[in-house]
Amino acid sequence: MALPSAPSTLWSVSLLTVLFAAVVHSNIIFDDDPLQPVTSDETVSVGGTVTLTCRVPESDNSSLQWSNTAQQTLYFGEKRALRDNRIQLHRSTPTELSITIAEVQLSDEGEYTCSIFTMPVRTARATVTVLGVPGEPQILGFENAVPEGGKVTLTCTSTGSKPPARLRWYRGDQELEGRPDVVESVPDDPTYNVSSELTLEVSRSDDKALITCAVDHPSLAPGDKRSERALQVLYSPDVRITPESNLPREGEKFHLQCVGNGNPEPTSYRWEKKDGELPPLAKADGAFLRFEMLNKSDNGVYLCEASNGIGDSLGEYTLLVQGLMDPDYPDTTLSFLGSPTSPSSSLTAPPSSPRTPPPSSASIAPSKANPSPASSLTPSVSVRLNGVYTFTDAADNIADPTAMSTSSGVDHAVIGGVVAVIVFILLCLLIVLGRYLIRHKGTYLTHEAKGSDDAPDADTAIINAEGGHSGAEDKKEYFI
């Protein structure tokens, strides 16, 4: 094999050295060269606008030129060289040439060259990076509801990103950890499709919870592109019983409602009474248990079982029926009654707790107090609690300590006593008024009228009246 001669080898090495020096000279910016153009790399999203700027520190009246990735001249000074309406002149001075490219496409990516035609020609390159904007994420896996305790796998996919986007999972504001993203390149296109999977074990608290897939990409601001879907979890109902009133009273209509919170909603209800059967006047009507007329025999613990096909649950409620309430006395009052001549005083007692019914009967034996000198009667105590209850300290007057006096009898006695007192006071007033009128009945003469009956005329009567003062000592009248 013949080896190349030394002169030819030396010539080849020299040629390579010159070419390398030319390449290096075209790409290195020399700080001490005032005519060397200066550019900067730019990044833009698809559909955006990019501005390319070329500057030189000093000018020798040489023209600046911009060329595209295919080395086609775009602008030579102020003159357009390529007919592309997307490319416009931004600024042209002896030391600067700036152009803009609107509606950038992926094909616009590459190196653009700025040249100044001096001896030798000086150039600088600017790399334009075009970002492919990812599409809206799509979430799959919500087609069917998931039973409580089961697992669900969700898949999020985004297409058209460059560089590949990153997908993030959230439950509300809490970020979740999914599987690593799967990146697939698109044939005959510089973009990528990205997908991510998330597996969750769901509970009833996850029902209607929002699961979010968000796209993280340099071309997007945080939260620009995200998709939300709500989980659907099937679970057995939580049961509670709510009463129509917190103070159920004897003789009233009343109902209990069985409230079941489940997914799906309960479809069947079953009522029963703990340690016994439902009362005869209690009727089960789906989620309601209705009482036509409450009675104290209805007291007890009531149970409701609700079922929705996923499971069933039991709730309970303790019913305590209050005693009869007198409509004339809706308030609870303690009355202390003394002698007929002393005024009565009353003290309003605080209402009983909704869970504690008032006693159906009561007896109070107050300690004996020293009787008032003005009264010969022993003071008694009367308690009215949703009605009127009367108690005294005389043992002979109490036949049954646990008996409750009837409201109507005491009311009539009180009303009769009040009427009798009013009639007595009116009679006394009439007697005093009559006695006063009788004692002051009679005929009275004034000094001017003395002697007027015997005078023949008025002048004589006046003269007699004026002269009659001398006999005033003989006639005196006393008022008793």
Image: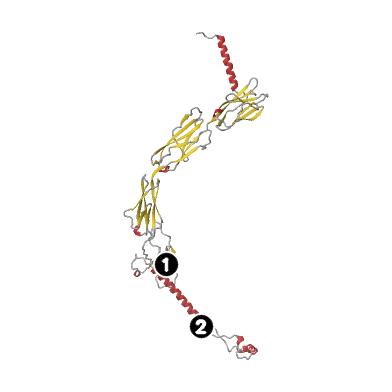
| Amino acid marked by disc 1 | Phe
Residue 257 in the image: state x and y as whole percent: 39, 53
419, 194: nearer the viewer: 194
Label 2 to label 1, Cα distance in Å? 43 Å
Q: Which residue corresponds to the image point at 48% horizontal and 78% vertical from the top-left?
A: 430
**Left or right of 216: which side holds 38?**
right
Query: Mark 2: which secondary structure?
Result: helix
Residue holding disc 2: 438
Residue holding disc 1: 336
Instruction: Quadrant for residue 198, please give it.
Output: top left
Compared to 213, does 36 lie above or below?
Answer: above
- Residue 370 seen in the current view: no
Residue 418 in the image: state x and y as whole percent: 44, 72
Q: Earlier in the sequence, mark 2 or mark 1?
A: 1
Q: Which residue corresponds to the image point at 58% horizontal and 17% vertical from the top-left?
A: 19
- Residue 227 seen in the current view: yes
| Amino acid marked by disc 2 | Ile
The label nearer to you, 2 versus 1, is 2
**Left or right of 326: which side holds 79?**
right
What is the number of the mark on residue 105?
none
Q: Residues within 10 Å of mark 1 (few under 14, many from 20)?
A: some
Instruction: Quadrant for residue 128, please give it.
Output: top right
Compared to 171, does 443 lie above or below?
Answer: below
